[in-house]
Amino acid sequence: MKTLRDFNVKNKKVLVRCDFNVPLDEKGNILDDFRIKQTIPTIKYLAKRGAKIILMSHLGEPEGKVVESLRLTPIQEKLKEYLDYSITKTNDCIGKETKKRVLEMTSREILLLENLRFHQEEKKNDENFVKKLAKLGDIYINDAFGVCHRSHASIVGIPKYLPSGAGLLLEKEIRILSKVLKKPWRPLVAIIGGVKISSKIKVIEKFLKKADHLLLGGEIANAILAVKGILLSQPIPEPEVIKTIEKIDLTCPKLHLPVDIFISLAVLETGLKEGYLRQGGPGQIKKEEKGYDIGPETVKIFSRIIKTAKMIFWSGPLGMFEEEKFAKGTKEIAQIIARNHLAFKIAGGGDTVLALNKFDLFDKFDHISTGGGAMLEFLSGKKLPGLEALR
Ligand code: 3PG
């Protein structure tokens, strides 16, 4: 695979796919800029060598429409804090105006294209859309490790049309994660949570083979508990995901699901509006139930396993940690991981990084990846389409 260092970029228009998909609050403020900071070395490298730098990214899930709150303006502002070069932004990632702006660019100038996912063609990897993007640059650099598990236009399409390579961040992620993939220390404990059920469910089978223990929390665990009719009645995911969940063998001794869940706004038989719901306890499987955190029994069980680990992979919070009353499970598990000084500890993903910063545990990990789903797929041994496209 070629890297940034293999190209002479002087005066060239370099299209850089970044992962600026950062968590935002309701006012559009960036809650955590880790992913942006991690891309700065690539941008500086290109600027120092006189390239014309065209940055592109998605942000959130606008579903193919222009969503004002998902414009990349806060990203542009954040980049200005880290870089001493002129950084302008387009109102669309393609189109006449964008082409014109690109043609006017001078060396060392940085142009940020508007959210790629304002066009549904991005996720569909539409050939026409790919061509329009590719025409903007002379060289394509992928520095978006976090999106390499997606077969989207800006990830797998553009490399068909332009000389392509990996950016400094992508190169670093592959180097570190490949090492642990080749020689994991054992016991290897994988912890998966978060809300992106459909992408994370795909790696469960792989981790049940690869890891010594797989601990599940968050929406992914809730979905399994609901589909298997164990504890909760929600969320019920899409049919594809249900099929995958149905195939999961719950008797596998490596698999650990929550045994208690903190539910809220639920109507239990006891009349409680919130509280812990335990496997085997009263008031189970009611339509209104929704889980927001793992319970203390689960924390105890997970903690015993985590303490024995020599290597830990973690992606996805175990509850809705953004709210204080649902943060306990994620916080305690993060602290327990941090206290295992013998294990090599890797965490990744936008929300997980945000949680680690919130609990002041960021520095306790050996590697923090910019990828969540992408990191899990890579560590599960799956080939990532974005990396294959560069090869
Ligand atoms: C992430 O947040 O994991 C990446 O930016 C990919 O985002 P996606 O899951 O919306 O494709």
Image (cartoon, helix red, strand yellow):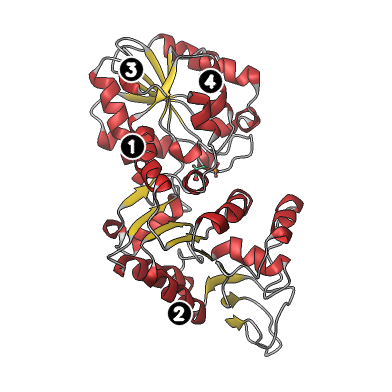
Query: What residue is at 32 percent from the left and 62 percent from the top?
Result: 343
Labels 2 and 1: the sequence-earlier one: 1
Asked if one can make out residue 67 in the rendered structure from this viewpoint, the answer is: yes
Quarter where residue 175 is shown? top left
Q: Callout 4: few (<14), some (14-19), or many (20+) C-alpha neighbours within 10 Å?
A: many
Give me the C-alpha separation between circle 4 and circle 3: 18 Å
Q: Secondary structure at mark 3?
A: helix
Give me the C-alpha separation between circle 2 and circle 1: 35 Å
| Left or right placement of residue 324 versus residue 254 in this view | left
Query: What residue is at 26 percent from the left and 24 percent from the top?
Result: 45
**Which numbered disc, 4 or 3, marks the residue closer to the eye?**
3
Query: What residue is at 33 percent from the left and 31 percent from the top?
Result: 168
Residue at image mark 1: 172
Q: Is mark 4 within 8 Å of ligand 1?
A: no
Labels 4 and 1: the sequence-earlier one: 4
**Which numbered disc, 4 or 1, marks the residue closer to the eye?**
1
Give me the C-alpha separation between circle 4 and circle 1: 22 Å
User: Which amino acid type is shown beneath numbered disc 3?
Assistant: Asp
Q: Callout 3: few (<14), some (14-19), or many (20+) C-alpha neighbours within 10 Å?
A: few
Label at residue 6: 3
Q: Are marks 4 and 1 in contact (CB under 8 Å)?
A: no
Asked if one can make out residue 274 in the rendered structure from this viewpoint, the answer is: no
Residue 238 coordinates in the image, percent (x, y)? 73, 53
Quarter where residue 234 is shown? bottom right
Residue at image mark 2: 300
368, above or below 97, in the image: below
Q: Secondary structure at mark 4?
A: helix
Query: What residue is at 45 percent from the left and 35 percent from the top?
Result: 72
Name the residue furthest bottom: 270
User: Which amino acid type is shown beneath numbered disc 1?
Assistant: Lys
Residue 129 coordinates in the image, percent (x, y)? 61, 20
Residue at image mark 4: 158
